[in-house]
Amino acid sequence: GGDSLLSPRGASSATTKSMGMGSGGGGDEAYRRLLGWYVWPDRGWLGLGCGALVVSAFSNAYAPKAMGRLIDAYAKKGGDLRRELGATAVVFLVGAVASGLRVRLFASVLERSLLRLRVDLYRAALAREIAVFSASSSVPDDA
């Protein structure tokens, strides 16, 4: 058939052409479609990972201020050192948990997306006629 080896999940030639993967299609559109095709099922986990990224970024941005407040509380004899120490610990703890969650979620989405891609690629390769993989039938002798 005219389907591309990388056609997602048994898509027809018309589908792959509309996705920009057929002859003359735009490359950027094809990448956006493939990204959506393989990543879209995990969009919830990806969104949660992005939320963890935002929390981690704000925690990392606030950490120097929290350390400064801790040093100021230590320098002042009447300062509330315990409260600042607790606040600084919470900032670092929240940042560490959010960062770990972000890494785990993004890695999990990547692994599942690549698994879907590999399964589709393997299925497409199995669906090909054996002549496609034969060097003698695909390359003429005089070429």
Image: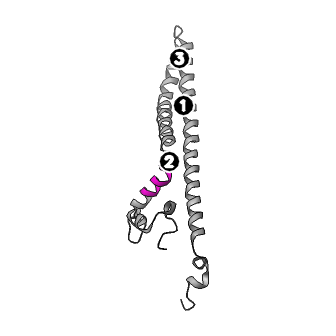
Instruction: Look at the numbered disc 2 and give the secondary structure of its residue.
Output: helix
Q: Secondary structure at mark 1?
A: helix
Count of marks, rendered view: 3
Circle 3: residue type: Glu
The relative height of residue 33 versus residue 5 in the rendered view (above or below) is above
Where's residue 35, x and y in %? 46, 54
Crowding around mark 1 (Cα neighbors within 10 Å: few <14, some 14 to 19, many 20+) is: many
| Distance Cα–Cα, label 3 vs label 2 | 43 Å
Separation of residues labelled 2 and 1 (CA atoms): 27 Å
Query: Label 2 amino acid?
Result: Pro
Q: Choose the circle earlier in sequence order: 3 or 1.
A: 3
Q: Label 3, on which residue? A: 84
Q: Quadrant of residue 93?
A: top right
Query: What secondary structure do most residues of the magenta stretch adopt?
Result: helix
Q: Which residue is mark 2?
A: 41
Check if residue 61 falls in the magenta segment.
Answer: no
Task: Report x, y in % for residue 19.
Answer: 40, 62
Residue most extreme to the top: 78
Mark closest to the chain's N terminus, 2 or 1 = 2
Which of the two discs, 2 and 1, sits closer to the camera? 2
Residue of label 1: 95
- Relative vertical location of residue 126 with respect to residue 102 in this rendering, above or below: below
Q: Earlier in the sequence, mark 3 or mark 2?
A: 2
Magenta part of the chain: 32-41
Q: At 54% across and 31% down in the image, what residue appears?
A: 95
The relative height of residue 52 versus residue 79 in the rendered view (above or below) is below
Image location of residue 114, percent across then percent down:
57, 54
